[in-house]
């Protein structure tokens, strides 16, 4: 499968996942009552992590997904739904490979640098 085909498969899945994120997150947020706590995002992230764990486990242990299907479901739909699921699955893979230090670094770096980048980006807009 060539790169353009892979890109189109991931993009199509990403569209579906992004739409799902909007629907699920906003629905959950409305059901729980307007709150400053982003429960909708929490639900989407936890669901995405569960789904990518299930699909990844099935793909590796039972070989039930072809490469194109994996791209569509895992990188596309779940990537569009939440990149947190990819982060969780990649960290899990590092732990399973016995690379505990790399897994720990990945978790800390993603959280600290990601949060720090959000703070920095926000601060930059204030300086304009």
Image (cartoon, rainbow, N blue to C red):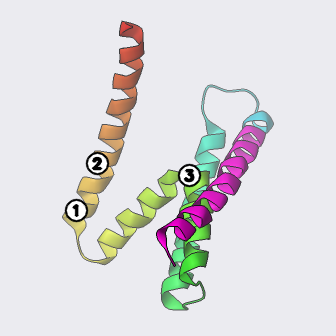
Mark earlier in primary sequence (2, 1) = 1
Counting from the top left corner in percent of width and height, residue 118 is at 40, 29
Residue at the spot 32% in from the left edge and 31% down from the top edge? 116
- In the rendered image, which residue does mark 1 sit on? 102
Q: Assign a secondary structure to mark 1.
A: helix
**Dominant SS in magenta:** helix
Q: Where is residue 62 in the image (x, y as percent from the top left)?
A: 55, 91
Query: What quarter of the picture does the C terminus occupy?
Result: top left
Mark 3 sits on what residue? 82
Tell me the crowding category of disc 3: few under 14, some 14 to 19, or many 20 or more residues within 10 angstroms, Cα based: many
Q: Position of residue 89 (x, y in %)?
A: 44, 65
Characterize the local packing of mark 2: few (<14), some (14-19) or many (20 or more) Cα atoms within 10 angstroms. few
Residue 106, position in %: x, y?
A: 29, 55
Q: Nearer the viewer, residue 11 or 100?
A: 11
Query: Which of label 2 and label 3 is nearer to you?
Result: 3
Residue under the point 36% across and 39% down: 114
Q: Is 109 in the magenta?
A: no
Q: Which residues lie in the magenta part?
A: 1-28
């Amino acid at each position: 499968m060539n790169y353009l085909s892979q890109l189109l498969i991931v993009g199509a899945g990403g569209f579906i996942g992004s739409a799902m994120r909007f629907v699920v997150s906003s629905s959950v947020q409305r059901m729980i009552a307007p709150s400053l706590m982003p429960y909708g995002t929490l639900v989407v992230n936890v669901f995405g992590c569960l789904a990518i764990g299930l699909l990844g486990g099935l793909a590796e242990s039972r070989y039930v997904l072809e490469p194109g299907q994996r791209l569509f479901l895992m990188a596309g739909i779940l990537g569009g739904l939440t990149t947190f699921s990819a982060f969780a699955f990649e960290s899990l893979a590092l732990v399973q490979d016995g690379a505990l230090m790399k897994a720990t670094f990945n978790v800390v770096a993603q959280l600290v640098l990601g949060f720090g980048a959000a703070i920095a980006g926000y601060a930059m807009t204030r300086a304009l």
